[in-house]
Amino acid sequence: MLWYALRRLVLAVPLLLGITLISFVVIHLAPGEPVDLQTGDLSVQSSAQAKQLLYEMYGLDKPLPVQYWNWLVRLARLDFGRSFAPDARPVLAKIGERLPITLLLNIVEMLIIVALAVPIGVLSATRQYSRFDKVTTVFVFMGFATPDFWLALLLMILFGVQLGWLPISGLRSLNWEYLPFWRQQWDFLSHLLLPILVATFGGLAGFSRYMRQSMLEVVRQDYIQSARAKGLAESVVIGKHALRNALLPVVTILGLSLPGLIGGSVIVESIFAIPGMGQLMVQAVFERDYPVIMGNLVIVATLTLVANLTADITYSFVDPRIRVGARRGRR
């Protein structure tokens, strides 16, 4: 298993380079340039001079292969460069400010989804065509068909505007620093309720459906019928023999969801004005802030490759047959 992991990590290096190369070329070929946004209010002559200075300062006057090579050299030193925004702050500093809230939102979201989706999927599969299964099926179709931005706007209008129960933007109220300690905690939590609810709704529908389908396939296998024929309790058959094998597709999906913990939810963070990684990415795209865009892409791409490897390794802990197969292969 160790050699397999090392081999996969080595092969991931050229793949990551290919991803960064394609991304670098695409964002530079996209319409609009960062210097146009920063010199829009100047006169024609002043604008041309300012553009030339900005081109030289940002290194955009060099050929594209040279720009990519210079960026790659900085990346090897874990230097993502400085933002093209007027503050010219280091990209890592801007990402570091946004990362904690994005991690908090997405980790809470994933914990809620897994905690609810697994039992819902198991109950739906073991009680196929029951009233519970039909209700969850309707919920799943609603979750798949409901756009996040539309659900977010509905909840904002209902709970934020009409009822006035929950705030609809940001992370803290304007008077947060003047509130008592426990009121501060509730204020912060109340700002997170609607974003987490919106982000969880669609994911819960999808994960529960994957779990149901996987469990249905497992309970029809011969070894499950043999376990029942031996007189084992149904809870033992489902919980010990069926559930572990049914979790394999869910492990794959969870592994691929790892980059989302860093990349953030672009729609949710933009609608609720949450200063996370998703909102930072949207702002960087609109401002043509190439270093910030590439910094986000590198982090997400790296996590995607690591997530695939983690999911493959996790299979051996979930399904004992994979470990047996690996030992036989070495013999």
Image (spheres, rainbow, N blue to C red):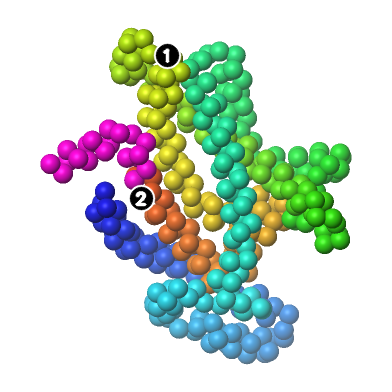
**Which residue appears farthest toward the left when viewing the image?**
331
* Residue behind mark 1: 233
Label 2 packing within 10 angstroms: few (<14), some (14-19), many (20+): many
Q: Position of residue 241 (x, y in %)?
A: 37, 24
Q: In the image, which residues are magenta?
A: 313-331
Image quarter (top left, top right, bottom left or bottom right) of the C terminus: top left
Q: Toward which corner of the image does residue 173 lie, by quadrant?
A: bottom right
Question: Which residue does the image show at 66% across and 53% down from the upper left?
Answer: 269
> Element type at marker 1?
loop
Q: Give the secondary structure at mark 2.
A: helix
- Indicate whether 280 appears above or below 223: below
Is residue 210 shown above or below 256?
A: above
Magenta part, dominant SS? helix
Q: Kindly identify which numbered label has been placed on residue 309.
A: 2
Instruction: Provide residue 62's location: percent of width, then percent of height.
Output: 45, 83
Is residue 136 or residue 180 the one in the foreground? 180
Say if the magenta span includes residue 314: yes
